[in-house]
Image (cartoon, rainbow, N blue to C red):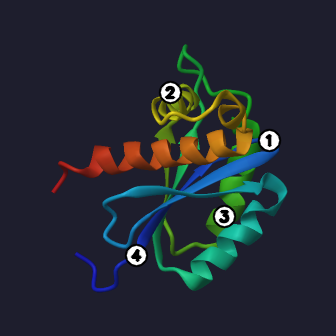
């Protein structure tokens, strides 16, 4: 266990917008943080880690149903490489994000959001990032 409590940040990287989620400092709960225009994402993350202790960053890994990388990987990999150079002390991990937008839409329906709100792509991206982070947390829950 660490002395300093720190957060885990999750990214649902998109061509135009990127959803961002973060844990509480105890790393128990995943919460949607915001949606950032993708061209501002690096600056946003650098500013965030100046203010908040971040233990690691989790990035959604877009795969197709046949297990091949989706076309978005050609955008994500250069971004992750830049992030690793800028923040070499923060590990970056990948999480399969195949079903996150389907789950995000279902969560919005289950949560009673009106159709107009469910069409808010920024909200979908933020919820998707939250699901990526929750998936990561659950995968680590029983590993000691």
Image quadrant where one finds the C terminus: bottom left
The residue closer to the viewer here, 142 or 126, is 126
The residue positioned 52% from the left and 80% from the top of the image is 52
Give me the C-alpha separation between circle 2 and circle 4: 30 Å
Placement of 15 over or under 69, stated as above or below: below
Element under disc 4: loop
Element under disc 2: helix
Give me the C-alpha separation between circle 1 and circle 4: 29 Å
Circle on res. 83: 3
Earlier-in-chain disc, 2 versus 4: 4
Locate residue 32: give its quadrant: bottom right
Say whether residue 86 is visible: no
Mark 2 or mark 4: which is in front?
A: 2
Q: Is residue 22 left or right of residue 28?
A: right
Say whether residue 41 is visible: yes
Q: What residue did someone put label 2 on? A: 106
Q: Are marks 3 and 4 in contact (CB under 8 Å)?
A: no
Earlier-in-chain disc, 3 versus 4: 4
> Mark 1, residues whose alpha carbon is within 10 Å: few (<14), some, or many (≥20)?
few
Q: What residue did someone put label 1 on? A: 15
Give me the C-alpha separation between circle 1 and circle 2: 22 Å
Earlier-in-chain disc, 1 versus 2: 1
Q: Position of residue 84 (x, y in %)?
A: 62, 65
Give me the C-alpha separation between circle 3 and circle 2: 31 Å
Q: What residue did someone put label 4 on? A: 6
Q: Is residue 63 left or right of residue 15?
A: left
The residue positioned 61% from the left and 84% from the top of the image is 50
Mark 3 or mark 2: which is in front?
A: 2
Earlier-in-chain disc, 3 versus 2: 3
> Mark 4, residues whose alpha carbon is within 10 Å: few (<14), some, or many (≥20)?
some
Placement of 55 over or under 136, stated as above or below: below
């Amino acid at each position: 266990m660490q002395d300093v409590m720190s957060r885990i940040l999750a990214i649902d990287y998109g061509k135009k917008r990127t959803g961002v989620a973060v844990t509480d400092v105890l790393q128990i709960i995943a919460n949607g943080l915001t949606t950032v225009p993708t061209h501002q994402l690096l600056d946003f993350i650098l500013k965030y880690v100046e203010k908040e202790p971040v233990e690691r960053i989790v990035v959604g890994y877009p795969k197709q149903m046949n297990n091949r990388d989706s076309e978005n990987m050609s955008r994500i990999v250069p971004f992750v490489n830049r992030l690793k150079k800028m923040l070499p002390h923060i590990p970056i991990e990948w999480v399969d994000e195949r079903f996150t937008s389907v789950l995000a839409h279902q969560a919005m329906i289950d949560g009673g959001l009106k159709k107009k709100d469910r069409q808010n792509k920024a909200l979908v991206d933020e919820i998707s990032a939250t699901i990526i982070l929750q998936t990561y947390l659950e995968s680590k829950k029983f590993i000691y």
